Image (cartoon, rainbow, N blue to C red):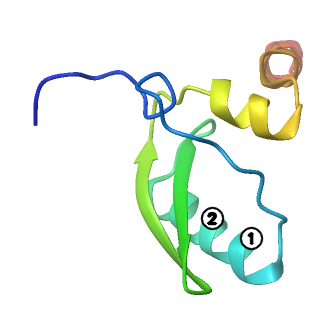
Amino acid sequence: MNGDWRSNVARGGAVKRAELNPELEELALKASSAIGGEFIGIDIFEEDGEYLVNEINGVPEFKGFMEATGIDIPRILAEYVKRLLRR
């Protein structure tokens, strides 16, 4: 390891949108459940039709996700936190 803690995307990694299917959804939910946490990032690779959880990030970067999906994660996260605070 070279001590460079930038995200894969920040280091030049490419992102690609993946269509959610039952197998991918189940894997992501199982990975999330294994560590707990309310806001995490799960890097899943696909090779030869099989999925592999590469890493789970407790402090996720979402630039690549937003680039691939067009989903406004900061807005969604802010709305979630506001709902929690109103309880």
Q: Which residue is drawn at 22% across and 22% down?
A: 4
Measuring from the top left, give residue 78's x and y in whole percent.
Answer: 81, 14
Q: Nearer the viewer, residue 38 or 44?
A: 44
Q: Which amino acid does label 2 sit on?
A: Ala
Give how far apart the Cα atoms at labels 2 and 1 are. 5 Å
- Judged from the image, the secondary structure of the residue bearing numbered disc 1 is helix
Q: Is residue 51 above or below residue 39?
A: below
Neighbour tally class for label 2: few under 14, some 14-19, many 20 plus, Cα within 10 Å: some
Measuring from the top left, give residue 69's x and y in whole percent.
Answer: 84, 40
Q: Residue at x 65, y 66 (%)?
A: 29
Measuring from the top left, give residue 5's x and y in whole percent.
Answer: 28, 23
Left or right of residue 9, residue 75 in this image: right
Quarter containing the N terminus: top left
Q: Residue at x 63, y 64 (%)?
A: 28
Q: Which mark is residue 25?
A: 1
Q: Residue 55 carries which label?
A: none
Left or right of residue 18, residue 58 in this image: left
Q: Nearer the viewer, residue 42 or 65?
A: 65
Q: Nearer the viewer, residue 75 or 21?
A: 21
Neighbour tally class for label 1: few under 14, some 14-19, many 20 plus, Cα within 10 Å: few
Q: Which amino acid does label 1 sit on?
A: Glu
- Judged from the image, the secondary structure of the residue bearing numbered disc 2 is helix
Measuring from the top left, give residue 20's x and y in whole percent.
Answer: 83, 67
Q: Residue 28 carries which label?
A: 2
Left or right of residue 5, residue 59 in this image: right
